[in-house]
Amino acid sequence: MDAEGFRPNVGIIVLNARGQALWARRVGGKDAWQFPQGGINPGETPEQALYRELYEEVGLTRDQVSMIACTRGWLRYRLPQRLIRRRSEPLCIGQKQKWYLLRLDAEEASISFDNGYKPEFDHWRWVSYWHPLSKVVTFKREVYRRALTELAPQQIQLERRWLRGQDS
């Protein structure tokens, strides 16, 4: 937790060769979908947290993806008042995130939720890159917009390469 009450976290956008994003549904959340994300443990770098969370949440290892880009700085969001755990010390008022853009190099069948950890997701699908912006919970929407916008040039290059390959 930083001095302001923001928990350090990583956000993960995994793209397929077409430039579509992996979109995952939270267990028990009915229609609660999001990108994989997770906290950075004490003594862990953001990049180490990225690969740990990637495996814990969607079963992918470092050698099954390629890192395309990451956001330059931290992107922050505040939790709604109803979600702040007032009794916890230190008090967490939100998250500060570094976002990573990855390309899946392995088969889709490599994506799994049963990896020895309590699953956070129960379903996934490929969606257009901007689709999550209108679907994620409201309090995360601005961080998603900023992350997607900053990383969009690299996503567009990937999508264009795929489209050129289809013309051949």
Image: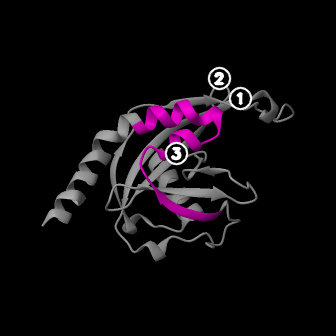
Q: Residue at x 43, y 31 (%)?
A: 73
Quarter assignment of residue 116: bottom right
Q: Residue at x 42, y 39 (%)?
A: 148
Q: Regarding mark 3 in the picture, which secondary structure is present there?
A: helix
Which quadrant would the C terminus be assigned to in this image?
A: bottom left
Q: Which residue is mark 2?
A: 4
Does residue 30 appear left or right of residue 145 in this picture? Answer: right
Q: Regarding mark 1 in the picture, which secondary structure is present there?
A: loop
- Tag 1–tag 2 contact (CB < 8 Å): yes
Q: Number of labelled discs?
A: 3
**Label 3, label 2: how far apart the Cα atoms are:** 28 Å
Tell me the amino acid under the disc marked 2.
Glu
The circle drawn on residue 132 is 3
Classify 87 as above or below 111: above
Q: Nearer the viewer, mark 1 or mark 3?
A: 3
Which stretch did the figure color magenta? Answer: 122-148
Q: Which residue is mark 1?
A: 93
Which residue is situated farthest in the left direction here? 168
Which quadrant would the N terminus be assigned to in this image?
A: top right
Q: Is residue 143 magenta?
A: yes
